[in-house]
Amino acid sequence: MSTFALVGPVSPNLTHFSQHDFDEVVAVDGGYQHLVDAGLTCDFCVGDFDSLGYVPADVPLVRLPTHKDQTDTEEALCYCMSKGADEVYVYGTLGGRIDHTLAFLQLLGEFGARGLRVTAIGDDQAIIPLWGEGRRQVFVKGEPQGTFSLLALSDVVAGVWEEGVEYELEDAQLFNACPLGISNEFLGKPARIALSRGSALLFVPLHVLGSVS
C-alpha cells in the first residue's frame, strides 16, 4: 500500500508530517517553501507558483497555467492517483481563505468518491471523507476520547450509524442544510461510524487518527 503526502501553502502541520514515512511527498505551490524553511524535501512539485513567487529548480515539477479550471491541489491529487497512491495525507490546506478551505473540503468528497483514501491534517484535527455503498466506513480502536463531528456533503446522507459514542445513531439521515452531526463524543471505547448512501466529512481529534481504520 503506497502512501503519499501533499504539502500545501497554508501553515502545514510539519510536526505531524515529520513523524511519518511517505512513499512520495508532493509540494503544492507555496508548500514547497514551508518544506525548504524546515529543512525538509519533496519528491515532486505541482502548481502555477503564484503564491510561491518562483519556480523551484531542484525538484521535478509540473507547472500549471494561472488561468485554469482546476486548483493546484486538485491537480496534485490527480497526480497522486496517476502514480498509484492508495492513501494520501494532505497538509497545509486548512485555514487561510474560507473559500479555499471550502473548495478543498469539496475535493475531499470528490476524491473519496473516486476510491482514494485521503485525509486532511490540521493543527489539532483530521478530516476524513466517508461515502456510502459500503465503500468506506470508520472503525475507531482502543480507547479514543474527544469530540468529533460528521457533516453531510451530499444533500442527503442515509443509513448513518454511529456506535460506541455519546450520541448514537441507528440508520439515521443527515442533511447538508442541517448540522445535526456536530459535536459528538468518543467515550474511551471502540466505535464505528458508517453510512449507506451519500457522502459526508468526519472531523476527529488528531490524536484519535492513529486509532482509525
Image: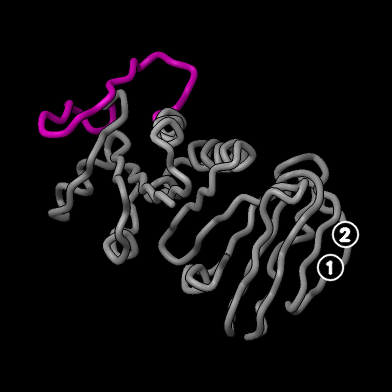
Badge 1: how crowded within 10 Å, few (<14), some, or many (20+)?
Answer: some
In this picture, is 153 found above or below 146? above
Q: Which residue does the image show at 30% across and 23% down from the upper left?
A: 48
Q: Which residue does the image show at 30% across and 66% down from the upper left?
A: 19
Choose between 117 and 97: the one closer to the eye.
117
Q: Is residue 109 left or right of residue 151?
A: left
In this picture, is 201 found above or below 48? below
The location of residue 179, given as percent across then percent down, is: 75, 55
Q: From the image, tell me which residue sits under label 2.
A: 172
The location of residue 96, given as percent across then percent down, is: 42, 45
Choose between 205 and 213: the one closer to the eye.
213
For residue 169, which numbered disc appears in the image?
1
Location of the C terminus (image quadrant): bottom right
- The Cα–Cα distance between marks 1 and 2, rounded to whole angstroms, is 6 Å
Q: Which residue does the image show at 43% across and 38% down from the upper left?
A: 84
What is the span of residues highlighted in magenta in the rendered image? 50-72
In this picture, is 31 found above or below 19? above
- Residue 160 included in the magenta stretch of the image: no
- Residue 63 included in the magenta stretch of the image: yes
Q: Hey, what amino acid is under mark 1?
A: Leu
Q: Is residue 205 left or right of residue 19?
A: right
For residue 59, which numbered disc appears in the image?
none
**Element assignment for label 2:** strand
Decide whether the magenta segment is chiefly helix, strand or loop.
loop
**Element assignment for label 1:** strand
The location of residue 2, given as percent across then percent down, is: 40, 49
Q: Hey, what amino acid is under mark 2?
A: Ala
Is label 1 in contact with label 2 (beta carbons under 8 Å)? yes
Q: Is residue 159 left or right of residue 71?
A: right
Q: Which residue does the image show at 40% across and 51% down from the upper left?
A: 3
